[in-house]
Image (spheres, rainbow, N blue to C red):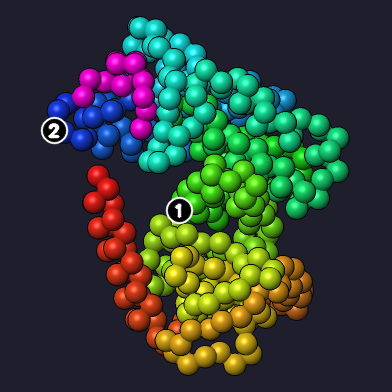
Amino acid sequence: MADESKGSYTYPDTPGDPDRTGVLRNKFGLTRHSELGPAEYAMTHIRQSEIAEGRGPSGNFDKEHLKAIHGYIFQDVYEWAGHTRNESPIVDGERVEPIGGLSKGSTSFLHGSRIDFGLDEALKPIRDPDVLRTATPEQFAERAGQVLAELNYVHPFREGNGRAQEAFIIELGRHYGHEVDFTVISKPRVIEASIETTNDPSSPAMKHVLEDSINPNRREALRAAFADLERCGEKPFEHNIRTARPGEEITGQILGHDDRAASIVTDERIIAVDRADLPERLPDDNAEVSFTARSDFSRLGREQQATEAHMRPQQAEQPQRDRSAGLKAIEAEMAARRDRERDDDDRGR
């Protein structure tokens, strides 16, 4: 992943053992990926939860604030927590060299020598508090999406960029009155948006990630899609899932639906749509449906309020979602797609 000086951040490799190759030096002294991964996750999850509860470091949403957040999340795992890769922290008693080139797959990130400049540029959209204070959710999503996309390209830390950036944006949203919930964003979705915005800075992909994270009706539709996948025996966060955009042409099979939202399986991803965008009479099992998305999901919020008001003082319940009778065909296609992706991964090693 990195083009770094020998012995700087990692333990010596064990030839022929991928589990002992490129393992980051850590406070636990764990020299296997299979051991470090679970330990790192457990400790950072605690710190991320503390930040979500408002107990993280405060700041002015500048590069020092971002570094403080990274330091807080990874303080239990790495000595270099909070240090950007253009710095020379002490690791295991030795000063490590700065990291210049850094890449992941076919994506190359900003050279380490330009980290400070890159961070200053990336944070420009949120520099004016007056603009953010009066921003609508959509305007906030656009600015926060720009920041997230640029920070991903800068990739200031040796490891943990995604977690630090998301915590930073969550805190930014909290400060300006917007709830940002990244639990509805799957990893394939983030990877796709990161690649798109790196290759094309004008891409709205990261803005759409933020809109799905902020809009409660879009979040509801995404959670319904997650539930549909779970009923299929799938792991939702292994799939690229997003909500539809008004004017988008969609073709696919219906995975599940109720009277509020539906999940559509397309060739590229799972798309959550407003049920009102689908034909009133749904197609036969296994048949594809083609339509133009029109709704901005605002109807879902109005219907939820009406349902809850009608059912008081009883607790409101979510509508039962119908599964396609042709679900086995969809499940088989998903299984075949996973096999193809696994073969592609193997060939790429």
Residue 58 occupies quadrant:
top right
Q: Is residue 4 magenta?
A: yes
Q: Residue 310's x, y, as percent?
A: 75, 78
Q: Residue at x 65, y 65 (%)?
A: 245
Q: Residue 101's x, y, as percent?
A: 43, 25
With respect to residue 341, does 73 lie above or below? above
Q: Is residue 251 magenta?
A: no
For label 2, the residue is 16
For label 1, the residue is 188
Q: Earlier in the sequence, mark 2 or mark 1?
A: 2
With respect to residue 219, does 292 lie above or below? below
Which span is picked out in magenta?
1-13
The residue closer to the viewer here, 229 or 308, is: 229
The residue closer to the viewer here, 119 or 297, is: 119
Q: Residues within 10 Å of mark 2 (few under 14, many from 20)?
A: few
| SS under mark 1 | helix
Q: Is residue 127 left or right of residue 93?
A: right
The residue closer to the viewer here, 34 or 349, is: 349
Q: Name which residue type carries label 2.
A: Gly
Q: Residue 51's x, y, as percent?
A: 59, 35
Q: Quadrant of the C terminus?
A: top left
Q: Residues within 10 Å of mark 1 (few under 14, many from 20)?
A: some
Q: Residue at x 62, y 87 (%)?
A: 279
Q: Quadrant of the N terminus?
A: top left
| SS under mark 2 | loop
- Residue 33 circle label: none
